[in-house]
Image (cartoon, helix red, strand yellow):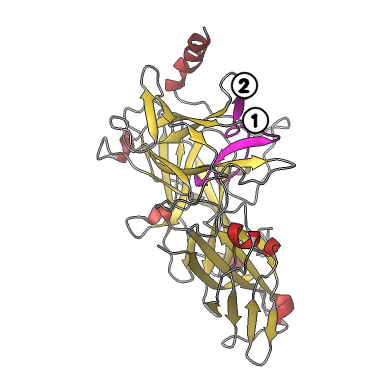
């Protein structure tokens, strides 16, 4: 009986998804200064450089003067909408800056999205949009915002990107933690910033340093203060002795390969094709909190879209992907998270506990591809990595951002230095 109800509920899923809503007094939309979709039919948002075979795995971070960013997303309906784009300039902490559009844009700040194509013979019809971002005049933090019909309040999605200029030199220092439990769980990122090639007044007040791990916005560290200041050498040194300023090493990401429906890849248990969209079931997971570290290659929490069943990505299907975590129930909530949902924790990726089988279950609509994921916990007593564990041996990619606000107009917080470094490179 339970399966029959489940089947009846999802038989209608092969039809196009309806537009969730327009804005109204009862359903307002407010701009989030984050990666965010404002309507549920907007899926698989990617913002990446246009170069290289693995460009969709690269961060939306480009050097000033080398412009090559493209935005892609799907609208899970079979009709074209009237979408527009604009660029928003932000401060180092991702609040809106006071700049006018002409301070950072070369043209009028509104662009139509005219490049799109329809999916072919997919269980859920969709329109795939792509848009080449216009160039900006200043290095710094930006968001691209998509909205409907020229109404800037009828928001569709927002996505962050970063433009840097190398006016300072960032150099890596030793990053080994001393000993004890701190050394087992954490990774210490030590580095120096040399600003001898740029005139900076009062660098302790006018320079901001931000660090993130694996392109994640949810663990961004923005309040980074130097440990030592050497005025004569024009150098700031950052050494983190306090574990509160360190990053948890975490664990290598869980993953599954759904590039093929006909021949499912690694960690996919089976695919139920009796209903459309198809239901994919990932092999059951268990807690890794007490397991020793195991080395393997992952995507650092990222994902990419691919279809091995056809040579044409227009045939790429969406599937409902089912996750199972076998574990006793905890005091807290459990979420399936990764770059595919911007590491946001909400009802769409929240798991529920099945007391009959002693396991958490969750279900997410995803496009064919290869995905990394983890189980994230929110709890008053447990850490977020409770089911994953944390190890200093884990391979992670870190990005260091150095911002400065010059005294001359337009007095914008500009990104004057950028460095990527690997902890435990393979």
103 over 113 or under it: above or below: below
User: Quarter of the image holding residue 314?
Assistant: top left
**Residue 293 in view (yes/no):** yes
Which residue occupies the foreground of this view, 335 or 316?
Answer: 335
Going 61% across and 46% down the picture, which residue do you hit? 385
Place of residue 28 in the rendered image (x, y in percent of width and height, measured from the top left): 70, 36
Q: Residue furthest left?
A: 311
Residue 120 located left or right of residue 204: left
Which residue corresponds to mark 2? 355
Residue at label 1?
329
Name the residue at 36% across, 35% down: 118
The image position of residue 32, as x and y in percent, is: 65, 47
**Contact (Cβ within 8 Å) of mark 2 with mark 1:** yes
| Residue 56 shown in magenta | no
- Please provide percent x and percent y for residue 300: 47, 53
Q: Is residue 98 left or right of residue 374?
A: right
User: Is 342 part of what is drawn in magenta?
Assistant: yes
- Where residue 248 appears, as percent x and y from the top left, is 60, 57
**Mark 2 and mark 1: span between their CA atoms?**
8 Å
Q: Which residues are magenta?
A: 329-355
Dot 1: what SS? loop
Q: Secondary structure at mark 2?
A: loop
Q: Earlier in the sequence, mark 2 or mark 1?
A: 1
The residue under the point 59% across, 31% down is 351
In the shown orientation, is residue 170 left or right of residue 282?
right
Q: Quadrant of the C terminus?
A: bottom left
Please identify the quarter of the rendering in which residue 139 is found: bottom right
Residue 128 is labelled as none
Query: Can you say whether 393 is above or below 17 in the image?
Result: below
Q: Is residue 189 left or right of residue 409?
A: left
Label 1: how many residues lie within 10 Å, few (<14), some (14-19) or many (20+)?
some
């Amino acid at each position: 009986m339970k399966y029959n109800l489940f089947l009846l509920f999802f038989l209608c899923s092969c039809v196009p998804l309806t537009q969730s809503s327009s804005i109204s007094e009862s359903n307002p939309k407010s701009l989030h200064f984050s990666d965010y979709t404002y309507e549920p039919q907007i899926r698989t948002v990617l913002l990446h450089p246009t170069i290289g075979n693995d460009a969709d795995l690269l961060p939306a971070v480009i050097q000033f003067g080398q412009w090559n960013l493209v935005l892609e997303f799907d609208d899970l309906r079979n009709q074209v909408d009237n979408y527009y784009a604009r660029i928003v300039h932000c401060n180092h902490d991702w609040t809106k800056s006071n700049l006018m559009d002409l301070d950072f844009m070369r043209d009028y700040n509104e662009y139509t999205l005219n490049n799109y194509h329809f999916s072919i013979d997919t269980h859920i019809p969709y329109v795939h949009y792509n848009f080449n971002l216009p160039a900006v005049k200043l290095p710094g933090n930006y968001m691209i915002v998509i909205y409907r019909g020229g109404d800037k309040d009828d928001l569709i999605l927002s996505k962050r990107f970063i433009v840097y200029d190398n006016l300072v030199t960032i150099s890596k220092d030793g990053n080994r933690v001393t000993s004890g439990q701190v050394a087992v769980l954490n990774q210490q990122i030590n580095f120096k910033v040399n600003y001898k090639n740029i005139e900076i007044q009062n660098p302790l007040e006018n320079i901001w340093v931000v660090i993130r791990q694996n392109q994640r916005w949810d663990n961004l560290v923005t309040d980074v203060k130097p440990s030592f200041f050497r005025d004569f050498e024009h150098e700031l040194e950052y050494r983190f002795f306090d574990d509160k300023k360190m990053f948890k090493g975490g664990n290598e990401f869980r993953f599954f390969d759904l590039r093929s429906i006909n021949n499912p890849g690694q960690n996919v248990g089976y695919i139920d094709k009796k209903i459309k969209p198809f239901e994919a079931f990932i092999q059951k997971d268990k807690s890794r909190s007490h397991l020793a570290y195991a080395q393997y290659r992952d995507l650092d929490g990222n994902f990419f879209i691919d279809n091995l069943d056809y040579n044409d990505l227009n045939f790429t299907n969406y599937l409902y992907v089912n996750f199972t975590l076998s574990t006793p129930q905890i005091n807290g909530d459990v979420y399936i998270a990764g770059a595919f949902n911007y590491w946001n924790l909400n009802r769409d990726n929240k798991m529920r506990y099945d007391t009959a089988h002693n396991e958490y279950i969750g279900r997410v609509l995803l496009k064919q591809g290869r995905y990394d994921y983890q189980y994230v916990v929110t709890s008053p007593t447990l850490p977020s990595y409770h089911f994953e564990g944390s190890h200093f041996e884990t391979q992670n990619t870190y990005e260091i951002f150095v911002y400065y606000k010059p005294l001359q107009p337009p007095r914008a917080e500009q990104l004057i230095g950028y460095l990527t470094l690997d902890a435990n490179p393979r």
